[in-house]
Each structure stands twice: as structure tokens, then as C-alpha cells.
Image (cartoon, rainbow, N blue to C red):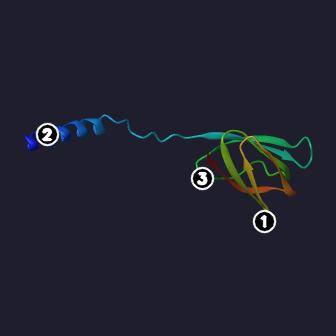
């Protein structure tokens, strides 16, 4: 009887684990707005929020960066600045400079 109970429990557990949905590999993208040091120089870019490194384009001197969505982004300027922006915020880049690269992560 004991062996039957253990076998039945193992059978039930194996069907529950095989019925579990597989984890999805979701790709999140967010929009970034770069506000140029010269007011009309503004552009947006859609980037992945998976930690991969991207290059902001075009090369303009940026004074503010705005990030949309639930993410945190790190931007690295050509003059060694590091700017951290959380989703929904606008941050100053000091001093204004061209951004060499960036990375975004979901939260």
C-alpha cells in the first residue's frame, strides 16, 4: 500500500510539472528622448531594455535625456560623463556632450 501511494504521488507530481508553462523570453523596448544643447536638436530612439549596449544616434551634444517606461538606463558620454535615468524621468547631462553608448534594464 505504501509503495502504491508513493507511486501515485510521483505520477501526479510529474503531470503537474509537465503541464507548467514554459518561461517566455520577453523583449522589452523603450523610447529615449535626447534633448540637444541647441533647442531644436532633439531626437528619439527605441532601444532594447535587456542590458545590451547601444549607440545613440545621431551625434549631437545632449543636455537632457528622458526615458519612458519601467526601466533604468545608463548613458556614457564622450567626455567621461555617466548619466543614470529612471523611467519617467528627465535628467541633465553635465556638461552637455555627445553620448557614446548606453544600456537599459527593466525594473
Estimate how packed mark 3 is, as few (under 14), some (14 to 19) or many (20 or more) residues with alpha carbons within 10 Å: few
Q: Which residue is tagged 3?
A: 52
Image position of 5 (left or right of 39)? left
Please tell me how crowded label 1 is: few (under 14), some (14-19), or many (20+) other residues with Cα within 10 Å: few
Which residue is located at x 76 percent, y 40 percent?
44
Residues marked 3 and 2 touching at CB (< 8 Å): no
Q: CA distance from mark 3 to mark 2?
A: 50 Å
* Residue 80 marker: 1
Q: Nearer the viewer, residue 92 or 32?
A: 92
Q: Earlier in the sequence, mark 3 or mark 2?
A: 2
| Residue 85 on image: x %, y % | 74, 50
Secondary structure under the numbered disc 3 in the rendered image? loop
Instruction: Residue at the far front: name it.
Output: 1
Q: With respect to residue 26, does 53 lie above or below? A: below
Q: What residue is pinned by disc 2?
A: 5
Separation of residues labelled 1 and 2 (CA atoms): 66 Å
Amino acid at each position: 500500500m505504501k509503495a502504491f501511494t508513493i507511486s501515485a504521488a510521483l505520477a501526479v507530481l510529474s503531470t503537474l510539472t509537465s503541464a507548467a508553462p514554459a518561461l517566455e523570453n520577453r523583449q522589452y523596448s523603450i523610447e529615449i528622448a535626447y534633448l540637444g544643447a541647441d533647442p531644436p536638436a532633439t531626437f528619439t530612439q527605441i532601444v532594447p531594455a535587456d542590458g545590451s549596449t547601444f549607440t545613440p544616434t545621431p551625434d549631437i551634444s545632449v543636455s537632457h535625456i528622458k526615458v519612458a517606461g519601467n526601466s533604468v538606463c545608463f548613458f556614457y558620454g564622450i567626455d567621461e560623463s555617466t548619466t543614470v535615468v529612471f523611467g519617467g524621468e528627465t535628467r541633465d547631462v553635465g556638461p552637455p556632450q555627445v553620448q557614446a553608448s548606453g544600456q537599459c534594464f527593466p525594473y
